[in-house]
Image (spheres, grey):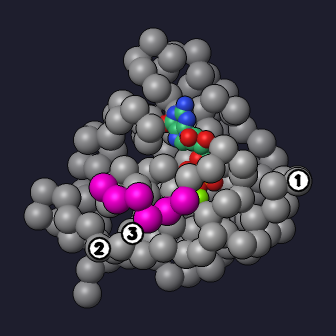
Amino acid sequence: APAIVALIGRPNVGKSTLFNRITRSRKAIVDPTPGVTRDRHYERVLWKDRPFILVDTGGIDDNPNDEMVTTIRGQALAAIDEADVILFLMDGKQGLLPADFEVIELLRRVSKKVLYVINKIDGPEQEQELLAPFYELGVEPLWVVSAEHKYGFPTLMDGLVDAL
Ligand code: GDP
Ligand code: MG
């Protein structure tokens, strides 16, 4: 069976946008309001002849009104459990929030492969400035991408299939 790759991260970091980018479909609902992915989405993906199943997480439990650390933690745990490889998304424009640290703590204790992805880096000119706070996480490498504008996308995909 193909490996399962799960997109995790707090609401609004761009999981569904990246899901749509990777699957080249518009199945996941993208909305500027945090928390509008309405259910879990699974789709088969083929990148350079390497198949995997991509899962978009976050959904009806997402609460746009607060940070919902407990919910995000629960969703992340469920996704981590079923996944072979995890794409952990953070928001390069917003920076790090408490919920990010919470999930990172979980991931440090998990023996699965994790790609730490900084989304919303829309071009090289933004990279230097926006990335600075993320170096303090002490995780390497940091994958830099713009799900919306495709910056860094092929590199991320190559890294992902290498981790399968
Ligand atoms: P999710 O809650 O993690 O699934 O996030 P969404 O995919 O729904 O995206 C939340 C918001 O971030 C939407 O307004 C997207 O248009 C925006 N967004 C997603 N990816 C990018 C990106 O690469 N660059 C920028 N500038 N905005 C993005
Ligand atoms: Mg979503």
Question: Looking at the picture, does residue 137 appear above or below residue 80?
Answer: above
Q: Secondary structure at mark 1?
A: loop
Ligand 2 image-quadrant field: bottom right
Give residue 107's position: percent from left, percent from top. Answer: 61, 62
Q: Secondary structure at mark 3?
A: strand
- Whether residue 8 appears in magenta in the rendering, the answer is no
Image quadrant in which the C terminus is located:
bottom left
The residue pinned by badge 3 equals 54
Image marks 3 and 2: residues in contact by CB distance under 8 Å: yes
Marks 3 and 2 sit apart, C-alpha to C-alpha, by 6 Å
The residue pinned by badge 1 equals 66
Numbered tag placed on residue 44 in the rendering: 2
Q: Secondary structure at mark 2?
A: strand
Numbered tag placed on residue 77 in the rendering: none
Of the pair 106 and 82, the residue shown nearer to us: 82
Tell me if residue 81 can be seen.
yes
Q: Which residue appears farthest toward the left when viewing the image?
A: 49
- For the point 11% across and 64% down, the residue is 49
